[in-house]
Structures are given as structure tokens and as C-alpha cells.
Image (cartoon, grey):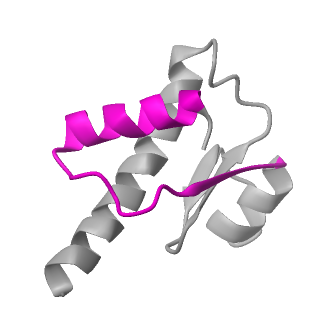
Amino acid sequence: MSDLYQALLSWAMVLSGYPAPAEPPNVIRVDHAFLVAGACGGVECKVLGWYNGGKNIYLDETLDVQNNLFDSSIAVHEFTHYLQTQGKEINDC
């Protein structure tokens, strides 16, 4: 995981109150069509990020997470979904 994504994951932990996950997620940059197919059932939508369980977070390849605050907020949002799932798995043990 890049330093940038690690920092954004840390920010998601601070904002959400969820603990650090045992393993960080994989961040995969994809084209918009992939996101529409997976997150919106193939119907055109404005999706920019998607977490569907597991270890992968998908971000639209057009996002400038490094330099655009809105774009970085999309990553933080998806990291929060990942943390929610990880927190649930910890509590289910």
C-alpha cells in the first residue's frame, strides 16, 4: 500500500473510530465501466469508488487522489467501508 493510501486509511480510522485492520486493503484503479458494471448493475451512474467486501477497494482511474481533496475523500469513504467490514469480523470472533 502506498504512503498516500496508508495516510488516507489512517484518516478513515480517525474519522470513523474503527481500529487499524489486520491487513490493509488492496487499492485497484479501474475504468469507469468496471465500476458501473459492479456497483450499479450495468446502469450508468456517477460511481467513483466501490468496496464490495473482501480485500479490494476499486477507485476510478480518473481520480487525482494526490492533489484533489474531493477525490481523496472518495478513497477515505471506501476505506471506511473496509474498516466497517474488518471491525465486524473482529467482533464476530
- Does 81 sit above or below residue 52? above
Q: Residue at x 21, y 43 (%)?
A: 16
Residue 6, image x, y percentages: 48, 36
Magenta stretch: residue 8 in it?
yes
Q: Residue at x 24, y 67 (%)?
A: 87
- Does 24 sit above or below residue 68? below
Residue 10, image x, y percentages: 35, 36
Asked if one can make out residue 40 in the rendered structure from this viewpoint, the answer is no
- The answer to whether residue 8 is left or right of residue 5 is left
Magenta stretch: residue 67 in it?
no
- Does 73 sit above or below residue 37? above
Q: Bounds of the magenta span?
A: 3-31
- The answer to whether residue 77 is left or right of residue 3 is left
Q: Nearer the viewer, residue 42 or 60?
A: 60
Residue 39, image x, y percentages: 63, 65
- The answer to whether residue 37 is left or right of residue 88 is right
Write down the quadrant of residue 60 in the picture.
top right
Q: Nearer the viewer, residue 60 or 6?
A: 6
Asked if one can make out residue 72 in the rendered structure from this viewpoint, the answer is yes
Quadrant where the C terminus is found in the figure: bottom left
Quadrant where the N terminus is found in the figure: top right
Residue 69, image x, y percentages: 51, 16
Of all residues, the one furthest to the top in this rendering is 67
